[in-house]
Image: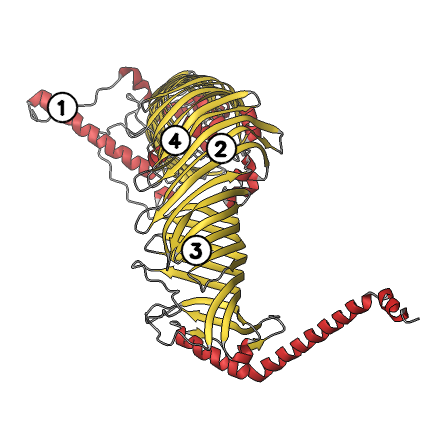
Amino acid sequence: MEEQPNKLVKKNPFIRLLKLIVWLATAFVLFCLIGITLVFIYEDKVKSLLITELNKNLKSEIKVQPENIDLTFISSFPKCALLFKDVVVMESWNKKNRDTLAQIGSIGLRFSLKDLFYKKYNISEIQIMHAEINLKTDGKGTHNFEIWKSNAENNNSVNDSLNFKLEKISIQNSSINYRNKKELLMSEFVIHEIHFKGNFHEEEFELQTQGELQKASLQKDKLSYFQNKNIKLEINLEVKKNEYQFKSALVQLNQMIFDLNGDFKYSDSLESLDLRYQAKNLDVSAILSLLPEKYKQRINEYKSDGEFYAGGKIKYATNEPLMMQSDFGVKNSSILYKPTGVSLTNIQLQGTFFMDKTKSGLTLKNIHALLEGDKIQGEFALNDFNNPHLNLKADGELNLNKLMKFWPIDTLEKLEGKLNFKASVSGKLENLKEKTLSENVNINIDAGLNQILIQFKNDQKESKIESCRVVLIERSATVENLVLKRGGSDLTINGKIPGLFNFILNSKQNLNIIGELKSNNFHAEDFIYSSGQSSEINIPENLNLKLNVLVNELQFKEFKAQNISGEFELKNQKIMISDMNFETMDGKAEIDALADGSNQNLSVNMQANLQNINIQKLFSQLNNFGQATLTDKQVKGFANAQIHCSAKWDNHLNVDLNSIRSTVTLNINQGELNDFKPLEGLSKYVDVEDLKRIKFSTLSSTISIQNKIIYIPQTTVKNTALNIELNGTHDFDNNINYHIRLLISELLSKKRKGSDDEFGPVENDPENRRSAFIQMSGNIDDIHYKYDKQGLKQKIKEDIQLEKQNLKQILKEEFGLFKNDTLKPKEKNKADQKFELEQPNNKKKEKPLEPKKKDDDDDDF
């Protein structure tokens, strides 16, 4: 019976554990209560002591409100912490206008609870959260972040009440921006979380670092090494004063993982670095992740596979430039463009990246790849990053449709055909961009194009290059038999075309063509009209041509020409045509012209010599010169003309009538004028049927156009209905002012029509010089006919002048007077005498007529 209690204890083994838990919980509660009580009791004293000691050791001004300083225990359990909120730290350097070094959400200085009993505070941890820190080093090497005094600067730095024996530093959700003008170094990154562990108060200790940086960027000497990358760190260092030796280190840069070893020296700044690295578990996708952010969207459309290797070293010393070298390569890799399923396979290359104080560069050797079976190979070298010099060798055969499906070109809607090439390029990049054919650039290319089909976006027409060979040797680019078809046009070009491939890949690049152009059919609308707008002219800014032209047939709207030869030049949207000869409108033409299409319109200056041109076709093909009074349905004949003209059209080919300036020296043979309305008013004197169809053998005149007015000088029209002399004006609104002279003898003859009329028998004057003067004025739809007094006055003046000459000639012949007078009498053309009636000279002097009060010009005829 005595062994019963022992048996009961053995049967309840959890009682001891329960008692232990209760005691531990009680101790924890008591510990917390003691901690809270001590914090409450000593809060003011601790705050005062720590702030006083901190101020003694600070070189920089720190701004924080008293209510934002707390002594805590619960949030920092099991340690106490002096917590500062909303802290502003000013720069440490001695300047009048100091900027903000940091804005910090919170800083926690942690120490043990027992320090409250002994009143000796050993700060073991520092925690910083939500900070924006701007670190700077000026050109002299002075830092703005030296906020803590050294022992030499502060005799009170050794104090038994406050010591920094740091074992851990944590930074969370903060950003750091560093600018070093002396070293030309810039760095910025966001700290998601990073922890430093070690006995920082010892001279020798092991430092452990773990953390994650986001949006990290590094730039040295204006050269960016990486931008906006994510970095993860796991680093163990042996620290001996200011010397650091890597024990182990793994750095993950985006998807790339590097194994690091080496050492560096750091006191106030980085003094030296000797680092070696080896990349692990790399693939092509990891390398693509290092490209700039702006390309990431495009990169996401590609899927890569294959092996990638890399290794290298980095060295740095104060006042010495950074030295970097890396060897890398790709084996058995492929890149798939996911939207189309087209792959670049069997990718292989060997590369080296290097940079030191004397040289820098990137080389790629033994490049091989297959694009859906099409082979590409070559070598690449880029030397001196400050002033890059390129050396490139490449050859291959490509189906351009496959290339478009693998790497779409934004400016192209369609690209098809075959390209085979062998190329080498050497020169500075700045010269390759701006002076492609300069002496500083060597380009050798032999390329063949076959059945190339190109269509730019927003262009409804395709351009087809049936065949072509392009050869560029020592800055001389030649094109052999470039057969181009577009719309209904065909062109064969031989000559020089610098920048052809740039233009094919980017329509904004210049296309320069110098040589010879031949064409069986050339439709100007296929090239000068903008896409989808058949009535809008758009001469490309980047198209420069200088060609000897041989065209069998050309068409522009209704205008047609054949057997064209001459010189054609286009530059800066200006077209110059020199010595252009062609056949058109049943005749021949020779033209020199300049057309400027650079100012949202088309300004033309032209000189032309026309021979035996069919007038009806001239009016028809030139749209009746923009007027409707006299059209191709009303004129016939053949013209010889010398034309000087200028005018402006908008980009829809609407002419600016005010801009037309022209002088035309005109000769018309076998002419015919049908249903010309202004002449119908003469039906009072001539049979209407005769006026509806007037034929004339010749017509000569010099006509000018200005300010929308056609100026017609004194012109004789000898025709089947009635010979007419006329001059006057006819504006573009069909307002006319004609002065017409009719021979009386012909009027009477036409009026009589073979028999006597109301005037009775009429006997012609001996010299047929009597005339009737008529003025036609008004709008073409409302013409007024009047007696033309001005025309009569002009005729009298001409007769008096003629009589003077005749009198002098008689006196000279009979009496020998006026021998020195060089004037000669006007010889009469006997063949034309029947059309001229002279005003009879009456022997009896008649009293001059008194002028009428009413102006005779207003009398109706």
Asked which secondary structure carries label 3, the reply is strand
Q: Would you say the residues marked 1 and 3 are in contact, meaning their CB atoms lie under 8 Å apart?
A: no
**Which residue corresponds to the image point at 36% horizontal and 32% vertical from the top-left?**
390
Find the distance from the CA under tag 4 to the CA under tag 2: 69 Å
How is the model colour-coded? secondary structure
Outermost residue on the right side: it is: 1
Q: Which residue is mark 3?
A: 239
| Residue 622 horizontal side relative to residue 150, left or right | right
Answer whether residue 425 is visible to the viewer in this image.
yes
Q: Residue at x 55, y 83 (%)?
A: 42
Find the distance from the CA under tag 1 to the CA under tag 3.
130 Å
Q: Residue at x 36, y 70 (%)?
A: 151
Report which residue position mark 2 lands on: 628
Q: Residues within 10 Å of mark 4 (few under 14, many from 20)?
A: some
Judging depth in this view, the residue of 715 and 485 nearest the camera is 485
Q: Are marks 1 and 2 in contact (CB under 8 Å)?
A: no
Q: Which residue is mark 4?
A: 381
Q: Secondary structure at mark 1?
A: helix
Q: Is residue 666 above or below residue 94?
A: above
Closer to the chain start, of discs 4 and 2, is 4
Q: Residue 122 versus residue 782: which sits nearer the camera?
A: 122
Checking the image for residue 809, the label placed there is 1
